[in-house]
Image (cartoon, rainbow, N blue to C red):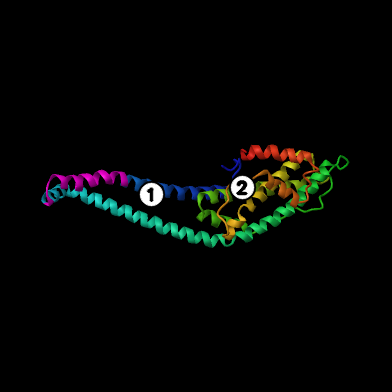
C-alpha cells in the first residue's frame, strides 16, 4: 500500500528521497548485471567447453581456446570485474546494516519525544476546536494552551536512519517528516489566529481535519516503536480507522458523542488510505 501523496516537500526531504533512490538504483543494476552474466555465460560455456569436448579431444579444445584467446581474456576480465563489484556491494550492504543499527538505536527516544509533542498539540487543537464550536465565542482572545515546540534531535535521527534504511522504511520516515512540517506550521498559524487583531474565521470543520491529521501522524509513529526497539519487523500496513479512534480516546476526544468526527474520519480515512 503506497503512502498518501504529499503536495509539499522541503529540500531536506527531497535530498533524503534522492539518497534512498540512488542506493536502490545501484543495487538494482548489480542484480541486472548478475542476471546478464548468467544468461550470457550459458552459451559461452557451451561453445567454449561443452561443444568442443564433444567434437574432439583435449587438443581440439585447447586449439579452440587458443584461437579465441583475446576474446576469452576479455571474458575472464569481465567476470573478475563482476566478482569485484559483487564483493564491493556486499561489503557496502554490511556497512549500511551496521550504520542503520547504530542510527536506529536513537530512534525510540526520538519517537517518544514526538509523541509528547503530539499530546501537547492535541490539547491546543482541542481547545481551539471547542471554542470554534461555541457560537458565543468570537475567538478573539488567545488560547490557554501555547503552541508546543518541536523536539530538537529528531531530524538528525530521522536523517541518519533514512540514509541507511531500506526503501520502505526510508519512505515511511520521510513521509512522517513532511507531514510533521505541515502540522507544525498549522499549529503556529492556529495559535496566532486567536487574537484580537486576527481576521481568521475559525471553522470547526478545519479544526476537525487537524485532529484527523494529528491522529494520522501519531499512528504512523506508533507503527515504528516495535521496529525501532528490534522486537518486530517493520510494519508497513495501512493505518486502520481504529488507529485514529484510539488516538482520539487517548486525547480525551469522545468519538461516540461526536458523530461529525466519526463520519469525517471514516470518509477521509477511506480516501487517504485507499481502503
Cα–Cα span, label 2 and label 1: 31 Å
Q: Residue at x 82, y 45 (%)?
A: 130
Residue annotated with mark 1:
30
For label 2, the SS is helix
User: The N terminus lies in which quarter of the figure?
Assistant: top right
Single out the mark in the foreground, 2 or 1: 1
Q: Residue 17 vs residue 254: left or right?
A: left
Horizontal arrangement in the rendering, residue 125 relative to residue 6 (left or right): right
- Give the quadrant of the C terminus: top right
Q: Secondary structure at mark 1?
A: helix
> Percent x, y for residue 222?
64, 53
Q: Residue furthest front?
A: 54
Magenta region, residue range: 38-58
Q: Is residue 8 magenta?
A: no
For residue 250, the mark is: none
Is 145 above or below relative to 131?
Answer: below
Residue hosting label 2: 178
Amino acid at each position: 500500500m503506497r503512502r498518501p501523496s504529499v503536495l509539499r516537500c522541503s529540500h531536506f526531504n527531497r535530498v533524503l528521497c534522492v539518497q534512498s533512490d540512488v542506493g536502490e538504483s545501484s543495487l538494482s543494476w548489480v542484480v541486472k548485471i548478475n542476471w546478464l552474466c548468467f544468461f550470457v555465460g550459458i552459451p559461452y560455456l557451451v561453445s567454449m567447453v561443452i561443444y568442443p569436448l564433444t567434437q574432439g579431444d583435449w587438443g581440439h579444445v585447447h586449439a579452440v581456446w587458443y584461437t579465441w584467446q583475446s576474446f576469452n581474456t576479455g571474458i575472464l576480465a569481465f567476470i573478475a570485474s563482476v566478482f569485484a563489484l559483487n564483493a564491493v556491494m556486499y561489503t557496502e550492504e554490511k556497512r549500511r546494516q551496521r550504520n542503520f543499527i547504530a542510527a536506529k538505536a536513537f530512534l525510540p527516544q526520538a519517537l517518544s519525544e514526538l509523541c509528547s509533542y503530539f499530546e501537547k498539540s492535541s490539547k491546543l487543537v482541542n481547545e481551539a476546536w471547542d471554542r470554534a464550536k461555541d457560537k458565543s465565542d468570537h475567538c478573539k482572545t488567545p488560547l490557554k494552551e501555547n503552541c508546543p515546540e518541536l523536539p530538537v534531535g529528531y531530524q538528525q535521527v530521522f536523517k541518519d536512519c533514512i540514509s541507511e534504511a531500506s526503501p520502505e522504511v526510508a519512505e515511511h520516515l520521510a513521509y512522517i517528516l513532511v507531514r510533521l512540517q505541515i502540522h507544525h506550521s498549522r499549529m503556529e498559524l492556529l495559535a496566532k489566529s486567536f487574537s484580537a487583531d486576527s481576521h481568521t474565521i475559525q471553522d470547526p470543520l478545519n479544526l476537525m481535519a487537524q485532529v484527523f491529521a494529528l491522529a494520522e501522524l501519531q499512528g504512523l509513529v506508533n507503527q515504528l516503536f516495535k521496529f525501532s526497539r528490534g522486537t518486530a519487523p517493520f510494519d508497513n500496513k495501512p493505518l486502520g480507522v481504529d488507529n485514529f479512534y484510539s488516538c482520539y480516546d487517548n486525547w480525551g476526544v469522545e468519538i461516540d458523542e461526536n458523530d461529525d468526527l466519526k463520519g469525517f474520519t471514516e470518509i477521509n480515512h477511506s480516501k487517504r488510505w485507499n481502503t
